[in-house]
Image (cartoon, coloured by chain):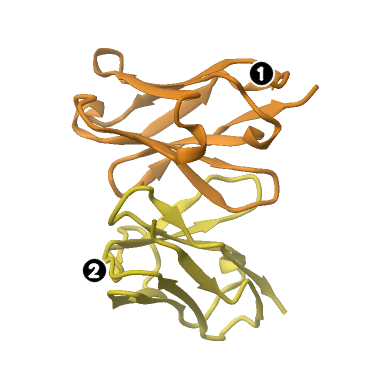
Chain colours: A yellow, B orange
Amino acid sequence: ETTLTQSPAFMSATPGDTVTISCKASQDIDDDINWYQQKPGEPPIFIIQEASTLVPGIPPRFSGSGYGTDFTLTINNMESEDAAYYFCLQHDNFPLTFGGGTRVDLK
Amino acid sequence: EVQMVESGGGQVKPGGSLRLSCAASGFVFSQYNMNWVRQAPGKGLEWISSISTSSNYIHYLDSVKGRFTISRDNADSSLFLQMNSLRAEDTAIYYCARGAGLDFWGRGTLVSVSS
């Protein structure tokens, strides 16, 4: 089973900040990682696929990078609407596994 | 417009059963693998099960193997999850999610297991 260690668990950011979230896999998963945004009471929204491809319709201030075991989600010039939970998912092998999540709040 | 609507959740006693459904529309259901994912109150996401397009390949989380059964009806664009021998720790919102990459999610249905 591939464990995803996501950090930090919580962070506060000011509009205009750059936010960086890490997701580390316990084994090589190529680029088979997706990122999701979730707001309270809502289902997750798909924002980054295959580690670095922005999902159509998602603002370009979101970006992803990484390969193998180390992955990063970056939000450039954060906006207030970006306050949410963010999760990584590996779909390289079963069982599919998620990172523990990062809550991003506004300062 | 892609839509997936889960139903069948509710309150059940430990040891009880529920059958969840996910009605899909707006895409060719038969061309996508499908998944169930759950989220316990205030917790993170947990993948439960996946089923391939023709139901040939099915995978389960170890903790639900032998208790949960995933199935699909491509003619009706529907996904199902039969849940038996339910436990308190199965309490969660259950989402259906589309594709091998889980690119679209329904809004979920709440399952509460308590005595």
Residue B1 visible in the displayed image? no
Residue type highlighted by circle 2: Asp
| Residue at image coords 67%, 71% | A105
Above or below — where is A59 with respect to B6? below
On residue B15, the disc is: 1
| Residue at image coords 54%, 50% | B45
Q: Quadrant of the C terminus of chain B?
A: top right
Residue type highlighted by circle 1: Gly
x and y percent of residue B66 in the render? 45, 25
Residue A4 visible in the displayed image? yes
Bin the neighbour count of mark 1 within 10 Å (Cα to Cα): few under 14, some 14-19, many 20 and up: some
Above or below — where is B56 with respect to A100? above
Q: Judging from the image, what secondary structure is the residue with disc 1 in? A: loop
> Which of the 4 image quarters holds residue B53?
top left
Residue indicated by mark 2: A30
> Which of the 4 image quarters holds residue A3?
bottom left
Extreme right residue here?
B115
Give yes or no for contact between labels 2 and 1 (Cβ–Cβ under 8 Å): no
Chain letter for mark 2: A
x and y percent of residue A22 in the render? 47, 77
Q: Quadrant of the N terminus of chain B?
A: top left
| Residue at image coords 30%, 58% | A56
x and y percent of residue A1 in the render? 39, 56
**In the foreground, A56 or B66:** B66
x and y percent of residue B11 in the render? 71, 21
Above or below — where is A76 with respect to B80? below
On residue A20, the disc is: none
**In the foreground, A29 or B93:** A29
Chain letter for mark 1: B
Real-space CA distance between mark 2 and mark 1, rounded to the nearest whole angstrom: 40 Å
Above or below — where is B29 with respect to A61? above
